Amino acid sequence: MMRASIQAVAAEAGVSVSTVSRTFTKPDLVLPETRAKVEAAARKLDFQISRSAAALKSGQTMRVALLSGGNIASWFNANVFAGLDSILHPAGYDIAVYAMSTAEQRRDFFTSLPVRRNVDAVIACSFNLDPDEVRRLSHMKVPIIGVNIPSTEGFDATVSIDDEQAMHMIADHLRSLGHRHIAYAGTASDPSSNMRFSADARLQGLMSACSAEPALRLDSIIIDDENPVNAVMNRLISTNTAPTALCCQSDDLALPLLYRLKQYGRDVPQSLSLVGFDDIPMSQQVGLTTIRQNPYGLGEYAAQQVLSCISGTMNDDERHSTYPVQLMLRETTMLLR
């Protein structure tokens, strides 16, 4: 059953919407008999007075917009949403999700700005807003919060992981195991896309870590192919000097590679140490060494930032935060023999 709207209450009571609003926010300005009619109509229609009255009084919509880069149903985005909802829903806020997975969706959104005047805050998750897009959002005069974004410019608050530092953790781990020839496997960057900054930052982080250690050699296996697993395998088995360790852009690439390597007789980690990134549930089950990030926790933290920004209680030292990651040491890395 749909909730009764303020317009429905006004129609039932035979008064204007503004009179309904005043009845719940400034009852002393409404005649007693008129107030009684409005309250009777609200009870009849099961109008949710408490929440609606608070919204009317504060001018809030009790709605937050989530602009989600990539696939909304992906492991990362779904967990960010769950974390946001765990905090915002009990606080009385609904979340309106807008997919930004294609250039067309993105262009349409920032051209029409469907959330204008209809939300109390905007959350941008996992894509890089260009300066013009940030400017357009800022005109809405509501807080803008970023989750896992590359820049804090124009945002009221942000929370992200440090992809580059995470790759330094991987490089240090492999170096401590005696590995000196490391490969990185990832998918090619689309110059027209603003949604690949995490993947690009991971490669840059590993390159930086290896360049700081003259003894380390890094090979980049960057694939622009519909079947990246086969493409990476072809590169690995065709090289004359094979790496002793392989770092993958994500667990989604590392896990099928683990299976294919065993098919080709390459024992992991005896002949090749393998590291992923994300720590999705399957990674724990198969014992993949990987970087654990916590998208649910990112969502929770961002939701608290939203509430602090809306209430005006945000501390400056919490405005732009880095969320910690962990290196999960499991069965796919070992000492080089």
Image: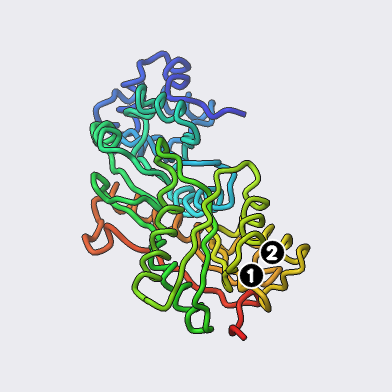
Q: Quadrant of the C terminus?
A: bottom right
Residue 186: x and y in percent read 53, 54
Residues at circles 1 and 2 in contact by the CB criterion of under 8 Å: yes
Report whether residue 181 is seen: yes
* Quarter assignment of residue 23: top left
Residue 59 vertical position relative to residue 312 in the rendered view, above or below: above
Is 262 on the left or on the right of 96, as rendered?
A: right
Is 255 on the left or on the right of 180, as rendered?
A: right
- Disc 1 versus disc 2: nearer the observer: 2
Q: Which mark is residue 258?
A: 2
Tell me which numbered mark, 1 or 2, is placed earlier along the sequence. 2
Residue bearing the label numbered 1: 288
The span from disc 1 to disc 2 (Cα, nearest Å) is 9 Å
Coloured how? rainbow
Q: Residue at x 40, y 49 (%)?
A: 197
* Quarter assignment of residue 329: bottom right
Residue 114: x and y in percent read 39, 25
Q: Residue at x 24, y 47 (%)?
A: 153
Q: Secondary structure at mark 1?
A: loop
Amino acid carrying mark 2 in the image: Leu
Amino acid carrying mark 1 in the image: Leu
Q: Residue at x 67, y 61 (%)?
A: 237
